[in-house]
Amino acid sequence: MANLELYELEGCPYCAKVKTKLDELDLDYESHMVPRSHSERTEVEEVSGQTGVPVLVDPENDVEGMPESDDIVEYLEAEYGS
């Protein structure tokens, strides 16, 4: 089973789009809520090199910090879709 991690922010529409795709594909993932303030998002910055969310981590496929919701959704569909 996938060992996915999602860095997200409560109420973020881009994060919601990724979560919807994860749910559609019935994928389990670990959620990491980030602070609202970009200056406090050190954890996601260490993973992805930037402070925006969402960010996906998929260690089984060497994805260490994929940003951009459209890219993440496309990746999930390609990697885990039927």
Image (cartoon, rainbow, N blue to C red):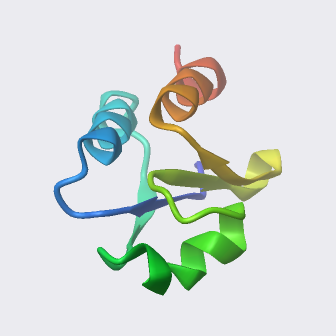
Q: Nearer the viewer, residue 26 or 22?
A: 22
Residue found at the far right of this picture: 62
Q: Residue 29: name its quadrant.
A: bottom left
Relative placement, left or right, of 74 versus 59 is left
Determine which quarter of the picture holds residue 3: bottom right
Residue 65, compared with residue 25, is above or below; it is below
**Residue 55, how many percent across, how many down?**
54, 54
Please tell me whether residue 71 is drawn above or below residue 68 in the rendered image: above
Percent from the top left, x then y, of residue 78? 63, 18
> Which residue extends farthest top?
82
Apparent side of residue 5 relative to residue 30 in the rendered image (left or right): right
- In the drawing, does residue 20 fall left or right of residue 54? left
Residue displayed at 83% across by 50% down: 62
Residue 31 pos. (x, y %): 39, 66
Give whichever of 4, 73 is nearer the camera.
73
Residue 70's place in the image compared with 3, above or below, is above
Q: Residue at x 57, y 51 (%)?
A: 56
